[in-house]
Amino acid sequence: MIANFPSFAKKINRIFQEVLESVKGGKNASYIPALANVDSSKFSLSVCSVDGQKLNLGDFNEEFCIQSCSKIFS
């Protein structure tokens, strides 16, 4: 449980904004069709605490292939 979720969310939002400004450019993996055609400017962050408090920032409603980041879940 995050006792003061609004304060936590404010700090995470500030970090998100700083990172958003510095993460520009780069290329998608062209050998993976599901990644090659994605807009590389999309960026999001979502947090859900164990008691269900949620924070979603950026392009969190966009669908995307998790092929490259799914390794941490498995």
Image (cartoon, grey):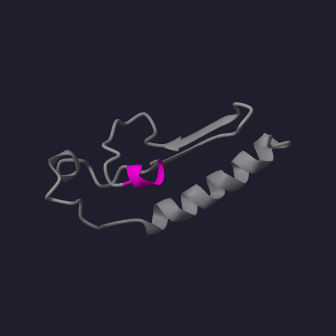
Is 10 in front, or is 48? 48
x then y, percent, for residue 53: 70, 34
Q: Residue at x 63, y 51 (%)?
A: 13
Is 24 rendered above or below residue 10?
A: below
Is 38 in front, or is 71? 71
Region rendered in magenta: 69-73
In the rendered structure, does residue 74 fall within the stretch colored magenta?
no
x then y, percent, for residue 24: 37, 65
Image label count: 0
Q: Residue at x 39, y 49 (%)?
A: 70
x then y, percent, for residue 72: 47, 54
39 with respect to 15 (left or right) = left
Instruction: Point out the image quarter for the N terminus.
Output: top right
The quadrant holding residue 5 is top right
x then y, percent, for residue 59: 43, 42
Outermost residue to the top: 52
Is the stretch drawn in magenta largely helix, strand or loop? helix
Q: Residue at x 79, y 48 (%)?
A: 7
Is 40 rendered above or below residue 2?
A: below
Q: Residue at x 77, y 42 (%)?
A: 6
